[in-house]
Image (cartoon, grey):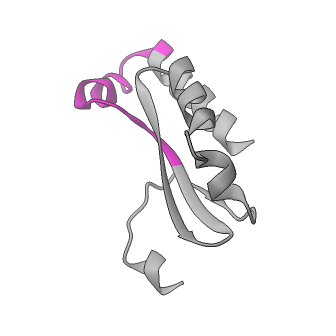
Amino acid sequence: MAGIQTQVFPGYSLHCTAERGYPDLVGREQSYINHIQSQYPLFRVMHQGIKRGYMVIWPEAKTPRAAADLAGDEELLKQFIELYLLLKR
């Protein structure tokens, strides 16, 4: 996995080893990701396919303002944690 050594991912990133993880998550129209992002409009789901059967995914705030608000807004932090747990399932 030489490629992953040059990439820096957040400490809370999720490593998916499902054989069809990347095509199932992203798909042609990205309907799964689009549905998730419609439920959590201040965040986006980032993903990086490393090789077949190995992908890294992580949620992140869409704007610097939303990222800064995570520290002080309990409701926003709760939504971020919910999104993370949804992706973790």
Give the residues in magenta. 58-75
Residue nearest the observer in this picture, 29 or 77: 29
Residue 83 is situated, as x and y percent measured from the top left of the image, at: 59, 30
Q: Is residue 16 visible?
A: yes
Name the residue rendered at 38%, 65% in the picture.
8
63 in the magenta segment: yes
Residue nearest the observer in this picture, 14 or 72: 14
Looking at the rendering, which quadrant does residue 86 occupy? top right
Residue 75, relative to residue 48: is it above or below? above
Looking at the rendering, which quadrant does residue 42 occupy? top left
Residue 16 is situated, as x and y percent measured from the top left of the image, at: 67, 59
Extreme-front residue of the structure: 28
22 in the magenta segment: no
Residue 19 is situated, as x and y percent measured from the top left of the image, at: 75, 66
Name the residue rendered at 49%, 13% in the picture.
75
Name the residue rendered at 67%, 36% in the picture.
85
Rendered-image quadrant of the N terminus? bottom right
